Image (tube, coloured by chain):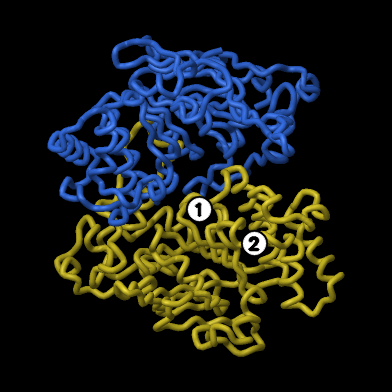
Chain colours: A yellow, B blue
Amino acid sequence: MTKKNTKIEKQKPILSVNGLKVHFFTDEGTVKAVEGASFDVLAGRTLGIVGESGCGKSVATRSLLRLVDSPGKIVDGEIIYRGDANKKEINITSLKTSGSDIKSIRGGEISLIFQEPMTSFSPVHTVGNQIIEAIKLHKKLNKDDAKGLTLDWFKRVGMPDPEQRMNQYPWQLSGGQRQRAMIAMALCCDPKIVIADEPTTALDVTTQAQILDLLKELQEENGMSIIFITHDLGVIAEISDDVSVMYLGNIVESASVDEIFHSPKHPYTTGLLNSIPSITNKNRERLPTISGSIPHPHNRPSGCTFRNRCQNPSDDCREGKIEMKLIEVSPGHFVDQCCINCG
Amino acid sequence: MTTKNKKDDSPILEVTNLKKYFPIQKGIFKKIVGNVRAVDGVDFSINKGETVSLVGESGCGKTTTARCIMRALDPTSGEIKFKTKNNEIIDLSKLSKDEVRPYRDDIQMIFQDPFSSLNPRMTLFDIVGEPLLVNGMKAKKEREERVSEIMHQVGLRPEYMMRFPHAFSGGQRQRIGIARALSINPSLIVADEPVSALDVSVQAQVLNLMMDLQDQLNLTYLFVSHDLSVVSQISDRVIVMYVGKIVESGTPKQIFESPKHPYTSALLSSVPKADPRLRQERIVLKGEVANAADPPSGCTFRTRCPNPTDDCRDGNIEMGLIEVSPGHWVDQCCVNCG
């Protein structure tokens, strides 16, 4: 189920996720939030993970940092991190959730930008102090140097009046400024991978445009990889190099951004793309929709999870006999085997 | 200054110079030290059967405008003329809370968040039937019939009538919200960001439903949204707001294909296009949205305008819409800045 991107030859991905399964053991039953997801993150590139609410995109990426809380548990699969060519590969799934190994990865090697910076910053500490704390944790710097570095990062992320903002509390900043502070905090320890979990969803379009541009600029300067999670296909088209489409805990299609948008193979990807309202659409035209709705997480269909919404499922598929598995249809373009011909 | 109607039928709603100021109070005696000018002189009209959209960024006053029309807020000044079912024209802004009540069944609202706008302890029948009960339909049998009819209309199965909201997905809940709004046959529906909490595939279903219902029931929509692609899909006319004022209005074609105001152009260029081959340079506005408590004098957009004239920079030009082509109105200051 592994996949390689042929565009970058021979280079091992910096992070490989193979057959990851994350289940939540609730009183009502087991919720299979992630059920065999596999994807690779390449150095210096942006992987967009797109899917609707409840598809498991956030849970899958949280498990990269072992941040899935009980009753959630990684039950199978491996997450291989190759941060340093000279060091050994690390299998993140085998680390203890509160050990020193994972703590040095969190924030230091792989960091996270949250969706709502208002709730992810502490309201009783100044933003400056919160970033200084992160720097002191991962770098051997004294307080003054850490402060200098924070100020430096505030300037790099384009914060207006950086000196003044350092001493302010999160609620004194606007939404865009808070997200800039969040980005400064995520990048201040020079991580190799940044996971951006819907970083622009809470922002206005004009602010969103500024933040997307900023992330692209910083990626060019620092060369970090970005895993960008969103439900907005417009944003994905804007920022990603590679795209993985998730549906009910599985990756159903993954390819380069151009392939996904211009020759999608999976009926779910096609359905999503068709249902986007667009400024170029005819006024008051009805949008094509995907029939049915996402099944409840407790009633996952057996076999191909998309079969009850598929327009033309095969007989075998309808009965749930076909296992889900990505196969390569053209170089670098992977589609779930069941749906290759349904799209 | 009112936006012109293309159709000749008279407007169902006519808003003139609507203002809503929120006082800023300070100190122990709650002395009023200033006002947040959330809506600062807005004029527009909506014809029967039309969809008019208010767009703009957070804090531009679009929701406040909608809430003033609903009389969920009391406007500071201005007129809201509404044509009732009996073809009476009333000014909603002048009526007291009690006097407004008889007209409540004519204007209904669809809310943004389908999770917090439905009472978790009420069944679907209670939620959708409550407006009927309040408006005098006492017989339970009659209400059940009406609720089941309306549920069918919005694409929900009437068997689910006795279930609670938690059993439904986001898209279904929004259908419940629509059913509740429609249950007493309103003529005007104010929809405040009705699809922004929904996923894209569900969003398409709800938008289609809203357009279908409009055709069947001859509804009039005032649609509030920050999402320009959604607005272009559903609207007959679009009104762009910035810091409490209308800066441009026209048909979707006029607004989206030949925007005249620099703010509209910047908004449009910020919308990510769902096609990686169309990645383009964006017009990035400098600075942040002006503070509504202390807006710039003259043209409120002058602090962010890419090329303001000298008069504009000094705040000497008053804001006011002028018609640049039939039905296309732009703020006079910025006609040539775009």
Please rate how many residues cluster around mark 2, counting C-alpha atoms within 10 Å: few if below 14, some from 14 to 19, many from 20.
many
In the displayed structure, B323 sits above or below B308; it is: above
Occupied quadrant, residue B320: top right
Residue B119's x, y, as percent? 35, 48
Please rate how many residues cluster around mark 1, counting C-alpha atoms within 10 Å: few if below 14, some from 14 to 19, many from 20.
many
Can you identify the residue that label 2 sits on? A121
Residue A308's x, y, as percent? 22, 61
Is disc 2 placed on a helix, strand or loop?
A: loop
Residue beneath the point at 44% across and 36% down: B192
Q: Is residue A326 in view?
A: no
Residue beneath the point at 36% across and 30% down: B108
Is disc 1 placed on a helix, strand or loop?
A: helix
Q: Nearer the viewer, residue A100 or B215?
A: A100
Residue A69's disc number: none
In the displayed structure, A207 sits above or below B191; it is: below
Instruction: Please state the chain letter of the residue tagged with numbered disc 2 in the rendered image.
Output: A
Residue A237's disc number: 1
Residue beneath the point at 62% across and 76% down: A106
Occupied quadrant, residue B61: top right
